[in-house]
Amino acid sequence: MRFELDSRTWRADLLQIILNVAVTFGVVVYGISVYWAWLQGLWAIILIDTVVIAAVLLLWWLKHLAYTLRALATCLVIYFLGAMLLTVAGTVAQIYLLGHSAITTVLLGWRAGLVSVVINTLTLVGMGVAGHVVWTVPPLGWSGTHADWALVAANFVLVAAVVTLSVGGVLGTLESALARERTARGVLRERERRLQTLIDSTPDTVMVLDAGAAVLETNPSGLSLLQAGSEADVVGRPFASFLAEADQARFQAFHEQVCAGASGRLECDVVAPDAASFSIEIVSAPMPDDDGSVRHLAIARDLTANRKIAEQLRRSQRLDAVGKLTGGIAHDFNNLLTVILGSADQLCESLEKGSQLRSLAETTRSAAVRGASLTQRLLAFSRQQELNPRPVDVVQLLHGMESLLYRTLGDDIEVALVAGDEPCVALVDAHQLESAVLNLCINARDAMPAGGRLTLDVKTRTLDAEDQPGPDRLQAGEYVVISVTDTGEGMSAETLSRAFEPFYTTKDVGRGTGLGLSMVYGFVRQSSGYARIYSEPDHGTTVRLLLPAVHDKAAEATGAYAPLAMQTSGEHVLLVEDDDAVRELVRSQLEALGYRVTSAGNGPTALGLLQQGHRFDLLFTDVIMPGGMNGRELADAATGLQPDLPVLFTSGYSESAIVRDGRLPEGTFLLSKPYRRNDLARKLREVLNGVAE
């Protein structure tokens, strides 16, 4: 008999066993009993046996009946057999009735067994009092009186109750044990299910190796790691056979150490079926078996993604170091360039054209402009330049650049602008975007020395998030996609992987700084966008700029500026600059432009002038200054004393106090250092006239 965790199951199995035995042996017993009864002329026994064997056969055949119905019918058959036997064999019948109570307890429970005891006792006493019980061995000294039957009933009740309760107690203990076993198996099964789910779903490979280092088991990740089609391709094979030849001996020695009881870690190369190799890391531990042997539990992980992320981190750290260096030198360097540019401009204006000194002054000015451009590119690359993002119609901006591109690229480059009729509006600094696109077009020109075709494509697209990890992972959203595609020589895989690195260039010495693409990358990332490059040798290059799209009908017009009235009306400017050389140069430039100027070397001094009641038409202040008050704090205090005072900030420092996340707050005016006199004149008039870019 098999016992299941469900008590109803083992009871049903027991009932079936009883019926199987009854059918198997009942036919033989029935034949012998009928033959004996026929010889003795006991026709009642023949009738009883026939009814019982028919009922047993019927119950055995009707397996589809509910268990409770079959068990109850079986108990009734046994009761019928015992009751009928009372009329022909009293002593044997009592044994049948006792067995009936025991079987009822087993099949239907101890409560049903006690009910059976009561019914059997009433049947025995009732039939005895009525004179229907035949005693095969009459009780010595008994007269068959009512007192005698009372004693028989008491004796039967006592024995039947003891048997019933004993059987019920044994079954109760058995069921409790089965319930505990069922609970324990359920908990174990649930733990196994969870563990199996965990192992199957983990991205790491989990394998069990035998003492010979052959694979016994692996999870789905192991099949993926080893690029196997099924478990049959992996299980039974030595794991070393999947490794590069140079690592097989190392792994075998490592495996022997693990089987000896040591845990460890090993890096080795796997050779894929396509002959490509990649590195994995194996973390192993011994796994003792019940027979005393030790198996090898190995957890393996592909290091390709980790190494890629580590390389990205190292590259990001290098770029961050360059960015910090840029920010550190920007302030002083831009102050120097402001003085050099301003002085060179003044020299060029005061010297005669064609003179040697004029030529030297122009050379100095050109070098200063190149230095200023280099500093600005470094700031753009490190995402520390000040941006003034506005809704810009990119299609309109590129149309405005067409004439500039034709002049810059030359006649041997065919330029095509592909754009739909719908506006493509991005939130971006228009001037920086113009510079970025121009840089990309110049790079494309250099990649097509024999001429070619340059295509500018602009679309608005809704993009899904990218799957690859890392800080440059594309986030889902709507973007204006600007694609710059050339038909040039393309890039190798090594060049493509380093294209955005600062100072990396494939051009000859003196032909480039290696900051063009890095400046574009830094500007786009600072604008919450993304830059992507697609290139193959001899198949050209496509650079895509993905900028956040906006739905703003008031997109800014670019490529042309409203003319400003440059003449002054003698406005009074309060100039605040801590660098003496810059302050004197700017003072002379402002006076040359027709402004009245009062200068101060720091914020407290300038604030003192305002507190004394002096009124000014404009505050032109540096942002980062000594004296315990920066330009923002000075502007706040000054506008508190003179609310209508316009403020123009200037700064050569990348981490300006007026910039938030690389962007200027609305209504803030900034003139970045280094600047030339024309830049200063235009910006002053814009602020004084209330015209914002």
Image (cartoon, rainbow, N blue to C red):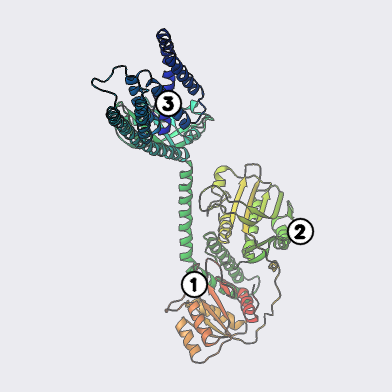
Q: Residues within 10 Å of mark 1 (few under 14, many from 20)?
A: some
Residue 550 can be seen, yes or no: yes
Q: Nearer the viewer, residue 502 or 218?
A: 218
- Which three-letter amino acid code belongs to the residue tagged 1? Ala
Q: Residues within 10 Å of mark 3 (few under 14, many from 20)?
A: many
- Residue 519 sits above or below residue 122 on the image: below
Q: Residue at x 56, y 56 (%)?
A: 518
Q: Give the structural element (helix, strand or loop) at label 3.
A: helix
- Which three-letter amino acid code belongs to the residue tagged 3? Leu
**Label 1 to label 3, Cα distance in Å?**
90 Å
Furthest-right residue in this view: 421
Is the C terminus in the top left, top right, bottom left or bottom right quadrant?
bottom right
Q: What percent of the width, then of the height, locates residue 109?
A: 38, 34
**Label 2 to label 1, Cα distance in Å?**
41 Å
**Label 3 to label 2, Cα distance in Å?**
85 Å
Q: In which image quadrant can residue 417 be found?
A: bottom right
Furthest-top residue in this view: 39
Q: What percent of the width, then of the height, locates residue 562?
A: 71, 74
Furthest-bottom residue in this view: 613
Is the N terminus in the top left, top right, bottom left or bottom right quadrant?
top left
Q: Earlier in the sequence, mark 2 or mark 1?
A: 2
Quickly name the residue at label 3.
Answer: 15
Q: What percent of the width, then of the height, locates residue 122?
A: 36, 31
Q: Nearer the viewer, residue 134 or 237?
A: 134
- Which three-letter amino acid code belongs to the residue tagged 2? Asp
- Residue 94 sits above or below residue 530 on the image: above
Q: Give the structural element (helix, strand or loop) at label 2.
A: loop
Residue 421 disc label: 2
Q: Give the structural element (helix, strand or loop) at label 1.
A: loop
Quickly name the residue at label 1.
Answer: 657
Q: What percent of the width, then of the height, locates residue 114?
A: 35, 34
